[in-house]
Amino acid sequence: EQSRENPAPGALIFIRDYLDFVRVRNLLTAEDVSFAVTSEYTDPRDAARARSIFADGRKRVLLVTERAHFYFRRRIRGVREVHFYSLPDHAGFYAEMLGFLGDGDGRSSASTAVFSRLDALRLERVCGSARAKKMLAPDANSTFIFTA
C-alpha cells in the first residue's frame, strides 16, 4: 500500500518470475510511481542506468527479477527497504538482497516478504524447516519480525 501511494526512496522490490514482474510494473505505471527496472530482458546499459538513477534517488523504487540477479549479480546501492513480492527459488538470493540494505550510511532499513502456504518449500529454504513449519501453522501470527 505504501509503495502505491508515496514510496520512500530506496525501495527495492524483488520479484521471482517475469509474469509477476509485468503485473507489478503495470501497477506501478498506473499509479504513477517513480520506478526503474532491471529484468533479464533489460539491456545491460539500461540496467546500469536504472541502478544509477535509483542509487542517486531520482527513482524511488527499483524492480529486480530473480533471473536478472542470477545472471548479472550487480551490486545495488541506495537500498533502504527490500520487499520480496515472492520468495526467491535460490535461498542465497534472500541474504544477498538483504546485504544491499543500508550501505553503512547509518539510516534505518527494513525488509518485507510476502508468502503463503504455496511458498512452503521456498520459505523452508530461506529460514529452515522448523521455523517455516511454525510460520505456516494455522494458529501462527500473520506478522513475523526477525532481527540480526
Image (spheres, rainbow, N blue to C red):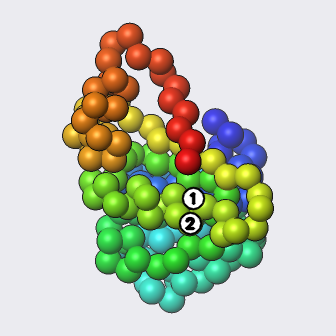
Query: Mark 1 highlights which residue?
Result: 12
Vertical comparison of 29 with 138: above or below: below
Please rate how many residues cluster around mark 1, counting C-alpha atoms within 10 Å: few if below 14, some from 14 to 19, many from 20: many
**Is 146 on the left-hand or right-hand side of 128?**
right
Q: Picture quarter containing residue 9?
A: bottom right
Callout 2 touching callout 1 (CB < 8 Å): yes
Quarter occupied by the N terminus: top right
Query: Mark 2 highlights which residue?
Result: 100
Residue depicted at 47% across the width and 41% down the height: 113
How many marks overall?
2
In the image, what residue type sits under mark 1?
Leu
Residue 71 in picture, x, y percent from top left: 32, 77
Residue 53 in picture, x, y percent from top left: 68, 76
Query: How far apart are the two marked residues, 2 and 1, measured between alpha carbons?
Result: 9 Å
Vertical comparison of 54 with 23: above or below: below
In the image, what residue type sits under mark 2?
Phe
Q: Nearer the viewer, mark 2 or mark 1?
A: 2
